[in-house]
Every structure is written in C-alpha cells, then in structure tokens.
C-alpha cells in the first residue's frame, strides 16, 4: 500500500535519512524504531510531504505521491499525527475534531464518526468545549489521533504517540491504536518505545543513523539479541 524507495532526506549538510527502502502492506501495522536522531521523524515528514526529500520515491496505492503538493496528501487518504501533536490550541476539542473532517464530502457521516471518536476517547467528549491548548499532554495526543481519524484516512502515520506520557495514558492511547488497527487501518508507527511498538505491530524496521539496519516480524525482532541489547535495555 505504501512503498518507499531510496528515500533520502538532508538538512543542509546533515544526511538525516540515507536512501531507505521499506513498505507497508494494506491492513498492516508496521513499526519504525530507533534511537534519538535516527531519522524516524524525517522519514515520516518526507512521506507526508511536510518536508522535501532530496531523493527517492514514495508510492501510495500505486500512485506516486512524492511530488504532489503537501496539502493534497490528506486527500489521498494519509493522515499524519505529528511529533508534538500539533493540535490547534485556540480551538476547542470539538472544533479540532471538525477540522479533521474538513476535506470530506460525506458530511452526513461526520456526526457518527465524532461519536465513534468519543467512544474511543470518552475524555474528549467530557472536554469537547475546552480549548485544546489547555488539555494535558495525553489528552492532546488523544485529540491529535482523533482529529486524524476524522479524515477517514486509509493510512495513519503516528510519530511517537507515547512520548512524554505517563504509563497509564500510554496504555489508554495504545488500546485505541490496537482497536483501530484491528479494524483494518494501515498504520506506520514510529516509536522510541521499541518494546511497545513491537508488541502492537506485525513487522518492524530498525533505523540507525539514517539507515535501516534490521527488519523482520515484530515478534522476531523482540527476541533479537541486537534489538534487546540496543533498544530494550537488556
Ligand atoms: N529542521 C532540521 N534542521 C536540521 N537538522 C535537522 C532538522 N530536523 C532534523 N534534523 C536532524 O536530522 C537527524 C534526524 O532527525 P529526526 O527528527 O528525523 O530523528 P528521530 O529519529 O525522529 O529522533 P527522535 O527520536 O529524537 O524524535 C538528526 O540528526 C536531527 O538533528
Ligand atoms: Mg522524531
């Protein structure tokens, strides 16, 4: 469904992503793990066209998307939940969620989807009228995921949903990520929390200094001595 070929990202002289190739099949959750600065976010941003790649191709559902305008990505069915969430702080929770549905034509279904999001995250329903900027970090993460789902994406790109959150909040958010994935959502999950990411995904890629150094079934990677030593603190 998503084919990334030879993707290369640089910031001036810094080679952040060095010609990486990987793919995500339809309905699959794939984890991209790696240490700080490995190039995970740069990879995701280049796919979502938030930044320009220096080289390489990205195909989504058979269509080359690596050259289209950034604002057309969402229309293709790709929703990015960025690092740091990126909610609109001066808008309320429900207004943020409505923004997610901005490009949809099936306006009649929006109310139903809003209920679905509130079902996933009851906290968002309680806080519907609260300004997003005053939500806690975990609530903002819920909102960012909810907003992405409101666009009815074909694929979710999640950049470190667990970052900076207390374990109980991480658990709540990953419960929903699991449910959404079980319902068939194709997902690319970026995490520094390698254990968690490999527990919820089917396949994984390990990124080091801008390159993919290891790949396999997530269950296999969880037991790989190199992964255990470098990323699972063992
Ligand atoms: N806007 C930028 N300008 C210059 N260098 C950048 C920029 N964004 C990222 N980099 C550099 O590119 C490299 C990869 O960064 P990236 O954010 O992709 O890593 P990451 O794997 O997401 O790390 P983290 O787990 O800390 O989020 C790092 O060395 C970083 O300093
Ligand atoms: Mg990052």
Image (spheres, helix red, strand yellow):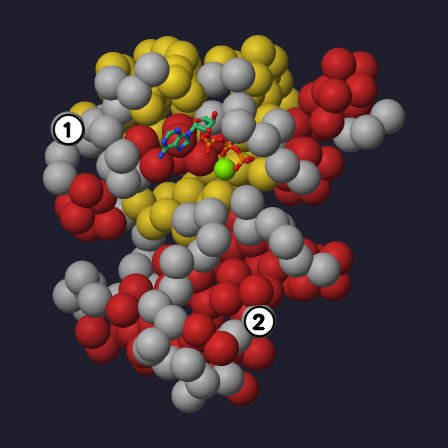
Q: Quadrant of the C terminus?
A: top right
Instruction: Point out residue 161 in the picture as x, y percentages from the top left corner.
Output: 55, 51
Left or right: residue 17 compared with residue 179: left
User: Residue 68, percent across and down?
Assistant: 13, 34
Above or below for 163 versus 40 = below
Element type at mark 2:
loop
Q: CA distance from mark 1 to mark 2?
A: 36 Å
Front in this rendered view, residue 100 or 19? 19
Q: Nearer the viewer, residue 234 or 173?
A: 234
On the picture, is 18 further left or further right than 209?
Answer: left
Question: In the displayed structure, would residue 204 be above or below residue 174?
Answer: above
Q: In the rendered image, is residue 39 in sight?
A: yes
- Which residue is drawn at the image coordinates 15% and 28% (left, top)? 67
Q: Is residue 83 left or right of residue 199?
A: left
Residue in the image at 50% along x and 66% along y:
140
Instruction: Judge the density around disc 2: few (<14), some (14-19), many (≥20) Cα neighbours within 10 Å.
Output: few
| Quarter of the rendering occupied by the N terminus | top left
Does 53 appear above or below 184? above
> Where residue 100 appears, x then y in whole percent?
30, 64
Q: Is mark 1 within 8 Å of ligand 1?
A: no
**Residue placed under numbered mark 1 in the picture:** 67
Check disc 1: other Cα within 10 Å, few if <14, some if 14-19, many if 20+: few
Residue at numbered disc 2: 136
Q: Residue 50 location in percent, x, y?
A: 27, 40
Mark 1, secondary structure of its residue: loop
Callout in the foreground (1, 2):
2
Whether residue 223 is visible to the viewer of this picture, yes or no, is no
Q: Residue at x 48, y 44 (%)?
A: 159
Q: Earlier in the sequence, mark 1 or mark 2?
A: 1
Displayed quadrant of residue 195: top right
């Amino acid at each position: 469904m998503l084919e990334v070929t030879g993707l290369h990202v640089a910031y001036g002289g810094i080679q952040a992503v060095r010609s990486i190739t990987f793919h995500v099949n339809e309905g699959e959750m794939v984890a991209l793990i790696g240490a700080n600065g490995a190039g995970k976010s740069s990879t995701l941003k280049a796919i979502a066209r938030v930044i320009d790649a220096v080289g390489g191709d990205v195909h989504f559902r058979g269509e080359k998307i690596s050259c289209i305008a950034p604002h057309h990505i969402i229309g293709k069915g790709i929703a990015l939940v960025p690092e740091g969430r990126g909610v609109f702080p001066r808008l309320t929770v429900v207004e943020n969620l409505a923004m997610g549905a901005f490009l949809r034509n099936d306006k009649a279904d929006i109310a139903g989807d809003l209920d679905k999001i509130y079902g996933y995250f009851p906290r968002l329903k309680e806080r519907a009228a609260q300004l997003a900027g005053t939500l806690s970090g975990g609530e903002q993460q819920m909102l960012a995921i909810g907003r992405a789902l409101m666009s009815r994406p074909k694929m979710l790109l999640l950049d470190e949903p667990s970052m900076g959150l207390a374990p109980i909040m991480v658990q709540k958010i990953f419960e929903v990520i699991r449910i959404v994935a079980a319902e068939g959502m194709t997902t690319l999950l970026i995490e520094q929390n390698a254990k968690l990411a490999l527990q919820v995904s089917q396949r994984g890629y390990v990124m080091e200094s801008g390159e993919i150094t290891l790949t396999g079934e997530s269950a296999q990677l969880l037991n790989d001595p190199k992964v255990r030593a470098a990323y699972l603190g063992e």
